Image (cartoon, helix red, strand yellow):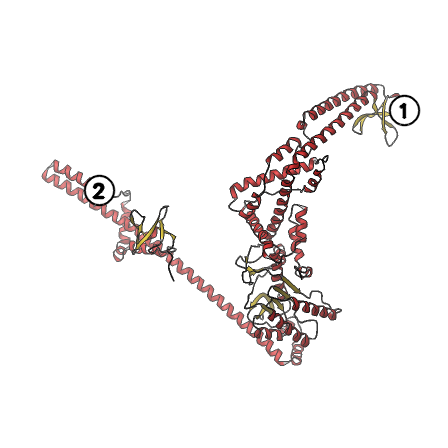
């Protein structure tokens, strides 16, 4: 079996993904490619596609969208220019010019954003751009697709003469019309247009009295249209000139086509590049629609889907407003096969299809709606047996078909296989079908394959408990509301909740009890035990979630209190500065008064000025401070913080708190820099609040809180 079988794509509705992406393309080749795309069986086949799509998605999300507008492929026409006399039509030439200009916009774009989109840029940089192609075409082709008068001197002269002759014909025609109108030979409309030429509207009775070229008759037969002989001669000249014009246009187009012939390979490359980018852009637009991301490639064949949404249900849910439940699905070498049980309509099949469709999309180069931490492997074989087409009339044929599938699965299953089986073992007698399915499950377990199966059979649930690599999971069911929650829970099998659902649907309890008596008591007891177990687990889970919520609230309150304490200490530090400033001012005032008192006593002017200069010299060495502080405020500050300042060293506490708030405290040997500086240094030693830094030629002591770690010293464990 080579590649993924088409039935797998049908079972998992992959075609809907292809159509959704194809609708977002600009070009027909890109649309056709996406409608036919199939999953690869090797990561190298889609690795670049995934990277390109991811960068396109980032472009769409960032607002720096890569230039992309209307683009029409043209290379089918390019194939024909190998014929010497063939020439490209103006419309094709205009598209070639548009393409070159579009790629020149890309060049401008990547001058600014090359680092943001390296993979797309690498592909783009492989193109050789020739702006002269667009320049040469634009000299000839006007924006509306017509040929410019300036395309050649000959064309300009011919068109000038055509216009001259047309004006002359109009003058002659008007004179002739005026003459025949005065003779009463013309109808009320007087004139018309036939084959682009002006003609007279002659009354039928005078048709033989007007000399000229017959051009037609009206429906009623009352009017005969005649081109006057005088203007007809000019029309013949104009027709010759128009023929000359067309010949000159063909000559110009042949020359322009000849000019482009050496660039044929480059033009092919331009179109191929833009078509590929159209494909990637369409995939990115689809990813944007379903919040898809690029997960990691699993190196160990592990399938780890976190918050995985069914892609089609997600897009439909967004349109309708219906909530879609994500699932966590994990398979690894120790737990390769998941057996999902639970009630009908509880989400078993959707969960299975979610894993399958996401895997197909990933292997086809699509981004997928999962959490970015998810991991996906690449499987060479993906097998599905999803019984969506069962009916009462074809039960036997369905089971035969499923047995045929099992025979194929057992032959193909190996460590590179991912199989998905919905309602495993159904279609035959429950006892016999269940036991045969159990044997098949044992064989799948031996093969090393990865897989997900859904079932209602208790023997398969029990087999999952005893077979290495196989494990149980169930779809959660709320016994209080008797409705599914659509959450997948791993570790235990699930109850089918047959009797509970029947009761909810209004089946009388007398009939339900009667059915229970007819059922093997062990099965009833086992099913009830599972139901009770799930209910207890649900209650415990809710209690745990409540405790976690309370714990998070306590943590938040603790952080708030710590922040409040930090801000309070900052304020106290500011108050202490104000307090010290006021004390200093008082000391200065006291010193000046002492100098003045001594001068009053001694009257020694020389000594007075000496003391003043000495005091001034001493004060100018001190750091300046703002002394414009209201006395009332200082007094209030002193009174409010004096006691607090006496109790503790606020600055000591503030320094310690600032260190505790650091992401990491530097240690000896670390390379660091002071905040706001670019110079790096090595930490020699660390004190309580400061560190000694070695800059090579000198050392410096710096507060710890001002340091940023550049590189940690490597330490042996």
Point out the frontmost of discs 1 and 2: 2
Is disc 1 in contact with disc 2, using a CB cutoff of under 8 Å?
no
SS for tag 2? helix
In the image, residue 424 above or below residue 272: below
In the image, residue 78 above or below residue 534: above
Q: Earlier in the sequence, mark 1 or mark 2?
A: 1
Q: Callout 1: 10 Å neighbours few (<14), some, many (20+)?
A: few
Quadrant for the C terminus, please.
Answer: bottom left
Residue 261 lies, in percent from the top left, at 66, 36
In the image: residue 264, left or right of residue 214: left
In the image, residue 156 above or below residue 95: above
Residue 390 lies, in percent from the top left, at 71, 67
Identify residue for label 2.
Answer: 619
Inter-mark Cα distance, 1 to 2: 125 Å
Check residue 69 in the rendering and tell me which mark sits there, or answer none: none
Q: Callout 2: 10 Å neighbours few (<14), some, many (20+)?
A: few
Q: Quadrant of residue 41?
A: bottom right
Quadrant for the N terminus, please.
Answer: bottom right
Identify residue for label 1.
Answer: 205
Give the tally of numbered discs: 2
Residue 22 lies, in percent from the top left, at 66, 50
Q: Quadrant of residue 416?
A: bottom right
Residue 507 lies, in percent from the top left, at 67, 73
Answer yes or no: is residue 375 visible: yes
Q: Nearer the viewer, residue 64 or 207?
A: 64
SS for tag 1? helix
Which residue is drawn at the image coordinates 41% and 60% (left, top)?
557
Answer yes or no: is residue 144 visible: no
């Amino acid at each position: 079996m080579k590649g993924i079988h088409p039935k797998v794509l049908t079972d998992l509705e992959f075609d809907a993904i292809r159509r959704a992406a194809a609708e977002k393309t600009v070009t027909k080749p890109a649309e056709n490619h996406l409608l036919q795309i199939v999953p690869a069986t090797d990561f190298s086949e889609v690795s670049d596609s995934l990277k390109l799509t991811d960068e396109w998605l980032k472009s769409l999300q960032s607002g720096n969208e890569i230039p992309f507008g209307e683009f029409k492929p043209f290379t089918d026409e390019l194939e024909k220019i190998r014929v010497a006399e063939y020439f490209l039509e103006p419309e094709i030439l205009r598209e070639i010019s548009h393409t070159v200009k579009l790629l020149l916009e890309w060049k401008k774009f990547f001058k600014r954003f090359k680092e943001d989109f390296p993979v797309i840029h690498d592909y783009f940089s492989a193109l050789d751009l020739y702006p002269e192609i667009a320049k040469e075409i634009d000299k000839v082709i006007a924006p509306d697709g017509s040929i410019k008068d300036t395309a050649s001197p000959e064309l300009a002269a011919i068109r000038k003469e055509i216009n001259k002759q047309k004006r002359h014909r109009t003058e002659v025609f008007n004179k002739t019309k005026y003459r025949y109108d005065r003779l009463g030979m013309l109808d009320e409309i007087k004139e018309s247009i036939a084959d682009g030429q002006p003609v007279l509207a002659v009354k039928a009775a005078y048709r033989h009295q007007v000399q000229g070229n017959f051009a037609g008759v009206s429906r009623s037969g009352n009017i005969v249209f005649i081109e006057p002989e005088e203007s007809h001669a000019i029309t013949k000249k104009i027709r010759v000139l128009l023929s000359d014009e067309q010949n000159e246009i063909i000559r110009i187009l042949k020359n322009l086509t000849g000019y482009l012939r050496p660039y044929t390979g480059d033009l092919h490359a331009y179109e191929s590049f833009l078509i590929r980018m159209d494909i990637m852009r369409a995939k990115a637009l689809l990813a944007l629609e379903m919040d898809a991301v690029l997960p990691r490639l699993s190196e160990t064949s592990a399938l780890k889907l976190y918050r995985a949404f069914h892609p089609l249900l997600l897009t439909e849910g967004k349109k309708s407003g219906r909530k879609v439940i994500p699932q966590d699905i994990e398979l690894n070498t120790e737990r390769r096969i998941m057996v999902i049980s639970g009630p009908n309509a509880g989400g078993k099949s959707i969960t299975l299809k979610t894993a399958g469709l996401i895997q197909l999309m990933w292997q086809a180069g699509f981004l997928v709606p999962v959490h970015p931490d998810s991991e996906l492997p690449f499987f060479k074989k993906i097998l599905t047996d999803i019984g969506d087409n069962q009916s009462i009339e074809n039960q036997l044929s369905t089971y035969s078909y499923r047995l045929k599938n099992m025979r194929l699965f057992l032959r193909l299953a190996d460590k590179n296989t991912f199989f998905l089986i919905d309602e495993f073992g159904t279609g035959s007698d429950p006892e016999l079908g269940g036991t045969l399915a159990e044997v098949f499950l044992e064989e799948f377990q031996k093969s090393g394959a990865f897989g997900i199966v859904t079932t209602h059979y208790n023997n398969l649930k029990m087999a999952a408990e005893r077979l290495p690599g196989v494990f149980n999971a169930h779809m959660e069911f709320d016994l209080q509301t008797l409705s599914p929650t659509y959450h997948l829970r791993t570790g235990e099998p699930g109850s089918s909740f047959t009797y509970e659902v029947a009761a909810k649907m209004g089946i009388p309890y007398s009939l339900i009890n009667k059915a229970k008596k007819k059922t093997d008591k062990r099965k009833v007891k086992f099913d009830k035990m599972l139901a009770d177990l799930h209910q207890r687990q649900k209650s415990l889970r809710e209690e745990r979630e409540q405790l976690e919520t309370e714990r998070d609230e306590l943590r938040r309150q603790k952080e708030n209190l710590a922040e409040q304490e930090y801000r309070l200490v900052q304020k106290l530090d500011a108050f202490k500065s104000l307090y010290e400033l006021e004390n200093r001012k008082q000391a200065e005032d006291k010193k000046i008064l002492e100098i003045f008192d001594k001068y009053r006593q001694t009257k020694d002017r020389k000594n007075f000025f000496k003391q003043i200069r000495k005091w001034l010299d001493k004060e100018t060495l001190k750091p300046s401070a703002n002394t414009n502080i209201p006395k009332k405020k200082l007094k209030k500050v002193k009174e409010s913080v004096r006691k607090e300042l006496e109790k503790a060293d606020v600055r000591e506490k503030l320094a310690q708190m600032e260190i505790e708030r650091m992401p990491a405290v530097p240690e000896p040997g670390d390379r660091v820099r002071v905040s706001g500086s670019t110079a790096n240094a090595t930490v020699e030693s660390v004190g309580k609040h400061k560190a000694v830094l070695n800059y090579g030629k000198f050392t410096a002591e710096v507060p710890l809180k001002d340091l940023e770690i550049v590189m940690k010293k490597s330490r042996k464990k």
